[in-house]
Image: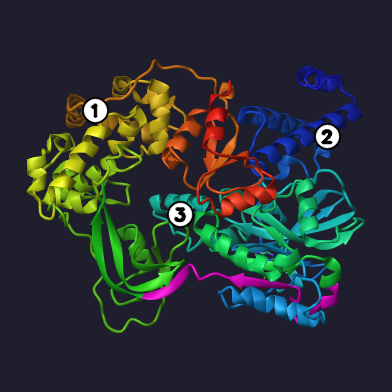
Amino acid sequence: MSQSDLFGAAQADASPSELAQLAASLRQQLHHHAHRYYVLDNPEIPDAEYDRLFRQLTELEDAHPELRTPDSPTQRVLGQVLDGFAPVRHAVPMLSIRTETDTEASGALAFDARVRRELELGPEDPPVEYAAELKFDGLAINLRYERGTLVCAATRGDGEVGEDVTQNIRTIGQIPLRLQGEAPPVLEVRGEVYMRRDDFERLNERQRSKGEKTFVNPRNAAAGAVRQLDPSIAAQRPLSFYAYGLGQVDGWAVPDTHSGILDALIGMSLPVCAHRTVALGAEGPNGLVAFHQAMGRLRDQLPFDIDGVVYKVNRRALQERLGFVTREPRWAVAHKYPAQEQLTQVESIDVQVGRTGKLTPVARLKPVFVGGVTVANATLHNLFELRRKRVRVGDTVIVRRAGDVIPEVVGVVAGNRLAYVANFRMPKACPVCGSEVVREPGEVDHRCTGGLFCAAQRKQALLHFAQRRAMDVEGLGEKLVDQLIDGGLIRTLPELYKLGIAKLAALDRMADKSAQNLVDALEKSKQTTLPRFLFGLGIRHVGEATAKDLAKHFGRMDSIMDASVEQLMLVNDVGPVVALSIRKFFDQPHNREVVEQLRAAGIRWEEHDPVAVDPTTLPLHGMTLVLTGTLPTLSRDEAKALIEAAGGKVAGSVSKKTHYVVAGAEAGSKLEKAQTLGIPILDEDGLKALLTQA
Ligand code: IVH
């Protein structure tokens, strides 16, 4: 009997063994597709098809509860609330790791020297082989698989006894409920549960817009989610996982090296971070230094927080010879980076007015070195968050800066406020233009009602319009915009194109040549594309990606301006909030006028009929490329645009999932990485050839 026959009426006639087979087949298919989706990031079937298979299995299990297995994908989300976590004694203690506090290169060399001394190696002996990987900033988890099925997930606890968090861990899509391939009687996998920075930002954004408590950093958010007693809440906190080692193993021929173990885990469908290396041969510990430096440069671009790298003696036989001191193995060390959180003092609290009129309280800080840069300002987001955190002038606060996220004040160090300091208040009038400040019911943000009358909004609107990713008016930076707006030379976007050399040259510190350059740049910017123009208008919620989707879908500016909310919602990733914001924007006569005047000023772009493109026919469909170095004729943005137009994606870092690396002059660690992973490397001509492939 075929799978589809077994649905509906035929199910009643199926024999128990046929039903069991069907359940097993559905489980296997769902495991396979979940792995493609969550781990490989490369699904083979649409979400709706996955949902259909999932529903079939759910129905089958509801009708025949005896078919429900602990590794069934339907067991990922469970409704029942726990009243505490059961203790779990670890079969093999979960150790911690010694930290090399020296954040300089010498930290790696000191570790190597210690290892060699312990192993009684002389200078003439060959270098020790090391595995190097990232030190993820999350929390350690032990996953116990029995005959390939996840039976228990436990926190580290005190290293001897942890907590049973199986229910919550099951909600993490990246963690296989069933291992692929070999199924040894016992295999414990250890690794880190963490939250990606974008998931963390989105979670906090959601909390903020509901006026609820935000999380201090991704690690706290992840730890809170794992130890959440209600698995359905845990399931709403997006977590990720990387495996980095083993616990108890029974009946499996463990590979001889740490790197071999990680490779084997990948083969079993476990996620292992691609940023790792083995330093061996003549390079010896210098390979570790190079890894520490390369990852340090990459740190801001990684999608998750790391607080350092970890070096491990690669050969297990040597690890065993080295053994442990107290709770730490002698064969591993963590080599840190500068912290992403630091203490400093609030000198004052100012209010900034953004492009959309939003008033943001900003803490002016005593400058502090955090996350690799000096930070003097940090956002406090909004009045409610500021109040909840109880931040006042003079307070000592924790500042966090990670990745390219704006530095933020995450909390106050209690108990050291010296004198009474008045509470911060939102101004009633816009600090820039004096217009009334309002807060819409149900919203947390205060806004200036001045619109383009407000110089802050005008300045920001102009900067946004002129930026490289929008109209790309070279040389129109912050200083010049200040001069143009403050000097009353322009009030609206279209007026920008009426600036003559004479007016410009009259500005302070503006030489004739620079004036001519700006006029030329403005002229050049007139030939643009619809997505750039649309993005440049600064419609709330319309970022670069949405602008591209809109342009692709509608083809013409007029169709976008006249589209109904329903029509707008047909566009990829456009939901009601975005659609409404676009509709509202074009409902304002003065915004339509701005568009008309800009067109009249000579701005032009190509339009096309709304076409239904089949993305699977594009030459780079489903492919991920990484750009590095300087290409001879294409800018980074141009190359990216070409790749995306051909259906490809551009990623920031090289991994096993990268299909091609496009390298130009002065390509750095990404190129090296591609070489070690054996990923094909293209030059500009190679890229162009790929793009024009049928
Ligand atoms: S190995 C025997 N590898 O760091 C060594 N730990 O104190 C056991 N961590 O909380 C740990 N990334 O969760 C190892 N690549 C990595 C790691 C890592 C992060 C965490 C681990 C534990 C702490 C070790």
Colouring method of the image: rainbow
Residue beneath label 1, please? 603
Quadrant position of the C terminus in the picture: top right
**Looking at the picture, how far across and down is residue 237, in whole percent?**
56, 51
Give residue 420's mark.
none
Q: CA distance from mark 3 to mark 1?
A: 39 Å
Image coords of residue 306 (percent x, y): 57, 62
Within 8 Å: ligand 1 and the Cβ of disc 3? no
Q: Residue sitting at 45 percent across and 34 percent down?
A: 641
First to last magenta residue range? 320-344
Kindly identify the residue that appears in the image at 30 percent across and 84 percent down: 418
Q: Earlier in the sequence, mark 1 or mark 2?
A: 2
**Of residues 252 and 349, which is closer to you in this image?**
252
Q: Which one is nearer the viewer's eye here, 627 or 645? A: 627
* Other-residue count near label 2 (Cα within 10 Å), few / some / many at <14 / 14–19 / ≥20: some
Q: What's the residue at 44%, 49% (across, down)?
A: 206
Q: How many numbered marks have been drawn onto this rendered protein structure?
A: 3
Assign the N terminus to one quadrant of the image. top right
| Residue found 43% across the figure and 38% down from its top | 633
* Label 1, residues with CA under 10 Å away: few <14, some 14-19, many ≥20: many
- Ligand 1 is within 8 Å of the C-beta of the residue at disc 1: no
Q: Looking at the picture, which amino acid does disc 3 mark? A: Asn
Q: Amino acid at mark 1?
A: Ile
Residue position for label 3: 204
Q: Position of residue 16 (x, y in %)?
A: 90, 29
Magenta stretch: includes residue 332: yes
Instruction: Point out residue 382 in the picture as x, y percentages from the top left corner.
Output: 32, 57
CA–CA distance between discs 3 and 2? 39 Å
- Can residue 34 be seen in this snapshot? yes
- Mark 3 lies on a secondary structure that is helix
Q: Is residue 356 visible?
A: no
The disc placed on residue 24 is 2
